Image (cartoon, grey):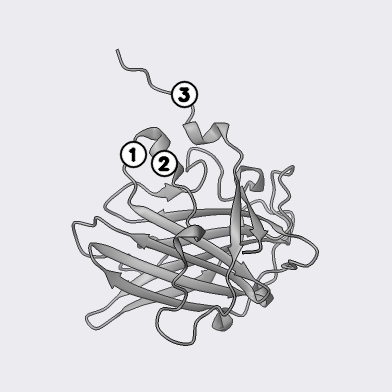
Amino acid sequence: MSRTNLLPQSFWFRLALPCRRVDALPRAKGRLLDLPDSCTLPDISTLEGSPSWASVRAAWNPSGLAIAVEVTGKLGPITRDPLGTSAGEGLQLWIDTRDTRTIHRATRFCHKFSFTLKPSSLSLGVVVAQKPIARALADAPMADLDTITVRADLIRGGWRIEAFLPAGTLNGFDPESNRRLGFSYQVTDLEREDRFLTVGRDFPIGEDPSLWATLEMVDP
């Protein structure tokens, strides 16, 4: 007889993951980021026996934070909510520049960004937004979204988003004094169940920084 786990396997882990330094980002030619394999973050969903269809990579340098996601194995076209909300396919990020793992409510150092795909007949665009975090003790300053560099591409069987968040968009980002970031993500492909770095929507992942992982910004 099969046994159903009361809690997801990811609940038992408090992840501290290396985030490698990659200079000269974003790139001036070719791919916006083109992060190496060594920047790949683990897909914890495989602990539940789920197939891995979203690969997420992260890197840093003194100028900011780089994130790339590739989704593969799609069977249909990219779907966008007709009302233009964040319900379409794409990526959501939560970043805490103080990695305050002992609190359950966000501070002014906690940020939420969304990157929602905007398909058209000629290209694949991205709608970038910064959103407040529910129940936060204080909101992070609103970033100048025009300074965020982002690119989306169609790839074989899916799509890719690459984004570079400059230091000025992340309140408190200061690698000289703090090399740890609280971090979590949600990848949405409307054909399949969302992918999360740690626990999923059964927990208040979007508002409780203690549920996020830690990125340790390391040198090459």
Q: Name the residue beneath numbered marker 2.
A: 45
Q: Name the residue beneath numbered marker 1.
A: 50
**Are the residues at dot 3 and dot 1 in contact (C-beta closer than 8 Å)?**
no
Q: What residue is shown at x 70% (from left), y 71% (from top)?
A: 141
Quadrant for the C terminus in the image: bottom right
**Are the residues at dot 2 and dot 1 in contact (C-beta closer than 8 Å)?**
yes
Secondary structure at numbered mark 1: loop
Please, which residue is most extreme toward the bottom here?
28
Rendered image: mark on residue 6: 3
Do we see residue 80 in this rendering? no
Q: Nearer the viewer, residue 209 or 40?
A: 40
Please, which residue is most extreme toward the right here?
177
Q: Is residue 169 above or below residue 75?
A: below
Q: Nearer the viewer, residue 74 or 58?
A: 58
Give the crowd class for mark 2: few <14, some 14-19, many >=20 residues within 10 Å. Answer: many
Q: What residue is shown at x 72% (from left), y 61% (from top)?
A: 109
Residue 153 occupies quadrant: bottom left
Mark closest to the chain's N terminus, 3 or 1: 3
Residue 171 occupies quadrant: bottom right
Q: What residue is shown at x 67% (from left), y 69% (from top)?
A: 170
Instruction: Tell me the amino acid under the disc marked 2.
Output: Ser
Residue 161 occupies quadrant: bottom left
In the figure, is residue 46 to the left or right of 145?
Answer: left
The spot of residue 46 in percent (x, y) is 39, 39
Could you give the CA–CA distance between mark 3 and mark 1, rounded to whole angstroms? Answer: 17 Å
Could you give the CA–CA distance between mark 3 and mark 2, rounded to whole angstroms? Answer: 15 Å
Instruction: Tell me the amino acid under the disc marked 3.
Output: Leu
Mark closer to the observer (3, 1):
1
Mark closest to the chain's N terminus, 2 or 1: 2
